[in-house]
Amino acid sequence: MNVSECAAFLRAHDRYLLVTHRNPDGDTVASASALCSALRRAGKTAFLFPNGQIIAKLRPFAEPYFAPAGYEPACRVSVDVATEKMFADGFAGTVELCIDHHPSNSHFAPHELIDPERAASGEIVLALIRALCGSVTKEEADLLYIALSTDCGCFQYANTDAHALRTAAELLELGASNGPLNQLFFRRVSPARLKLEGLVYDSLRFYRGGEIVVALVTDAMLAEAGATEDDLDDLAGLPGRAEGHRVSILIRDYPGGASKVSVRSGPDFDSCALCAVFGGGGHKMAAGCNIPAPPAEAARLLLAEADRFFS
């Protein structure tokens, strides 16, 4: 569907449940919350699936939209979810509409609004809210600024294009409080996070003459820093600060002896293709996957595949 067709679909249905993805970031949480707000303004009953993994910084923005216990939706809409494997923990059921910007989307929903040219799902949702309601509230502008700025790394990541910057300017004109939001999401971290960052930097290992940099995040490191899940937001960006690298990989302990992997790269390396080897996906320059092996073994497997991609 295009934006107009998607807006027509939303007008034709009711009793919505907005679904975010596992390990939720700012784009999925804030985009879904903004769309939930707009649906309510359009006279619809709409709630957000109460994803228990939403971090403390994002939770106050999402909680006003959480579905009450016992809520029975008639139409489920996923926002920023690339595959059915990524649905929030605890969510069960089918999704009727998927709104997303991942080029690796698995097309799991019978109806979809997907634009892989957009830097964040928040850009798609902004256009959809305009088509649905004809206006955007300040609260929705704040939410969509969170969605866009967090997926663009405060507009430092390579996915920040002219359209993303124009969208950010439009959101500011609509009342988005970029100053306080930038402080909250990009300038202030806990002492535990600062200590954890030091441990991550200490873990850096360089391969292929510095072209590949790998960082590990183990449960022991989290315990030493006193860090919780709320301190782990955007850790994947840390190894990418190393000068001269082409690919950065962050590998974290995952329950059951597995590893959660985040890959970042420049435009000359396909992070999504590398992660797809292990059943993951994402974008060309930012992707992820889970590997059923502890971090050290996961690193070995990833490096072997990365060498093949370089070749």
Image: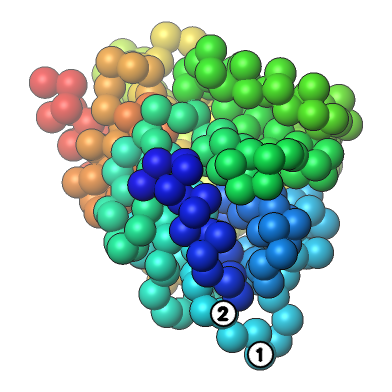
* Left or right relative to 7: residue 230: right
Q: Nearer the viewer, residue 272 or 249?
A: 272
Give the image location of residue 256, x and y in percent: 41, 71
Q: Check the image and report above or below for 226 versus 102.
A: below
Residue 271 or residue 29, whichever sits in front:
29
Q: Is residue 245 visible?
A: yes
**What is the tally of numbered marks visible in this picture?**
2
Mark 2: amino acid:
Pro
Q: Is residue 52 left or right of residue 195?
A: left
Residue at image point 63% right, 39% down: 130
Q: Quadrant of residue 191?
A: top right
Query: Against 201, is 81 above or below?
Result: below
Residue 205 position within the rendered picture, expressed as x and y whole percent measured from the top left:
42, 29
Estimate the x, y position of residue 47 in percent, counting from the top left.
Answer: 67, 69
Question: Seen from this angle, which residue lies furthest bottom?
Answer: 70
Q: Which residue is mark 1?
A: 70
Q: Nearer the viewer, mark 1 or mark 2?
A: 2
Residue 241 visible in rendering: no
- Other-residue count near label 2 (Cα within 10 Å), few / some / many at <14 / 14–19 / ≥20: some
Q: CA distance from mark 1 to mark 2?
A: 10 Å
Residue 311 in picture, x, y percent from top left: 11, 21
Q: Residue at x 62, y 16 (%)?
A: 166
Residue 262: quarter of image: top left
**Residue, disc 2:** 73
State the residue in front, 8 or 295.
8
Residue at 74% over, 51% down: 58
Image coloring type: rainbow
